[in-house]
Amino acid sequence: MNLWADVTGRRQRWADRQNARLRREYEASLRHWQSEADLNEHYHALALGARPLGPDQAPAGVGLGEDEEVYWAGSGAVLVECAEPVRMFRPVHAAYCPARRVGAYAPLYYDADASRDRGRVVVTDQRVLFIGGHVDRTWPFAALTGLVHSHRGAMTLMRVSHRQADSGLALDQRSGDEFRFFLALAMAAARGDRPGFVAHVAQLAARHLAERPTPPRQVSPRQAPAAATAAATWLTRSCFGPPGATTVRQAVPVLIMAMIALGAGVVLVPGSADGQASSPAAAARTPGPTTGVTAQGGPSPKRSPKRSPERSPEPARRPQPSTTPTRSPAWRSPSPSAVAADPVAYCEALENPWGYTFCEGEPITEPDAAFCDYFECVKNFWHGKGQVVQCEDGTFSKSGGRGGSCVQHGGEKRTLYQEG
């Protein structure tokens, strides 16, 4: 056996695999970069050449003001109203980005109850106009104080000074991209600063061109790790995942190994090998089943961490000596008391001084005045005019049952009740 030839062949195979992997990663990043570059180029050209629609192209049935010009019109828009205020951005040039990498973009959610009507939308150089089957809505640029776009979907929320509730429009993906661009262009035209908007889009495009991925350097066989190092690297990747793996991906193998070690320790407990019962001291060290807040449980108090709702663990029972010695198995099926006692995560114990619960009862519309001192509430909680609900991120809102609540907190999770 030619040992040198075997080592050389292993190093060459390692180099081939590394070069192939680096090439695939480079080609994928280059495709993504080129797609974004094409998008920036398209909207930069559109910003330079787009003109208002002519009188024969303007949608029928839209009452335009004097010198008002239409920049874009679309159909299939959904009018969305928010039951609570939403964090907004200033309506300036920097709020727009074709690739959504920077600007006024945030995670937004809304349910079916938040939609008020469906209809057409028109963008002019003075306002955004929604014409629905039952409701019409206008957002004048002169009164526009804030806006925010969904960073994944095609929803845009707007705030005007003369209306208390935030509202906006949800469209399909293609129409949403066009609507956002022409909204930014029309606002620039209304401010008399269209050249500034064109320069902003050009700057985004130039900045992206400077970020073109560079081809990877070729890896040579001489860079291959030694056999022992390669084995250690393989073992580390197998246990903890590749570099940059999530915390969960890294923690799961560690937990599995800990469970295996714990199971092996059960067999090695003194006295278990010869069939004798374990000592009371060992039994006392074994924790009994506990009942606490689940992973999807109640909120974390904002000001008083010591009030975190917990139950005291049940005392461990003293084991009864067995008259018939038996060998303790390394693994045994969990007893019913060791399994979570509450399979319904949405109905759980919630410690608080007012008897509020996630189980049965009456919905709460007027919570105690100290509610937000005990639980974590959304901003402007007391402005809500609905039921108290918990959002997906654990915060509480007083706008439940009306649609549009928890819009920036993952949507509604469950309703809070007053025990009967």
Image (cartoon, grey):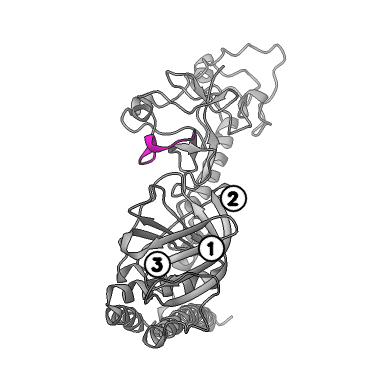
Amino acid type for the residue under numbered disc 2: Ala
Q: Nearer the viewer, residue 225 or 312?
A: 312
User: Is 187 included in the stretch rendered in magenta?
Assistant: no
Amino acid type for the residue under numbered disc 1: Ile
Amino acid type for the residue under numbered disc 3: Arg
Local crowd at mark 3 within 10 Å, few (<14), some, or many (≥20)?
many
x then y, percent, for residue 121: 51, 67
* Camera sees residue 287: yes
Range shown magenta: 378-386
Q: Secondary structure at mark 1?
A: strand
To which residue does mark 1 refer?
Answer: 131
Local crowd at mark 2 within 10 Å, few (<14), some, or many (≥20)?
few
To which residue does mark 3 refer?
Answer: 127
- Spatial CA distance of label 2 from label 3 is 26 Å
Going by the image, does 309 lie left or right of 340? left
| Rendered view: 371 above or below 256 | above
Local crowd at mark 1 within 10 Å, few (<14), some, or many (≥20)?
many
Q: Tell me the chief SS of the magenta region.
A: loop
User: Is 382 included in the stretch rendered in magenta?
Assistant: yes
State the mark number for residue 341: none
| Rendered view: 172 above or below 418 | below
Mark closer to the chain start, 1 or 2: 2
Quarter of the figure that contains the C terminus: top right
x then y, percent, for residue 123: 44, 71
| Circle 2 or circle 3, nearest the eye | 3
Going by the image, does 360 lie left or right of 202? right
- Residue drawn at the location 58% of the way across and 29% of the way down: 347
To which residue does mark 2 refer?
Answer: 112
| Rendered view: 125 above or below 262 | below
- Spatial CA distance of label 1 from label 2 is 19 Å
Q: Secondary structure at mark 2?
A: helix
Discs 1, 3 touching: Cβ within 8 Å: no
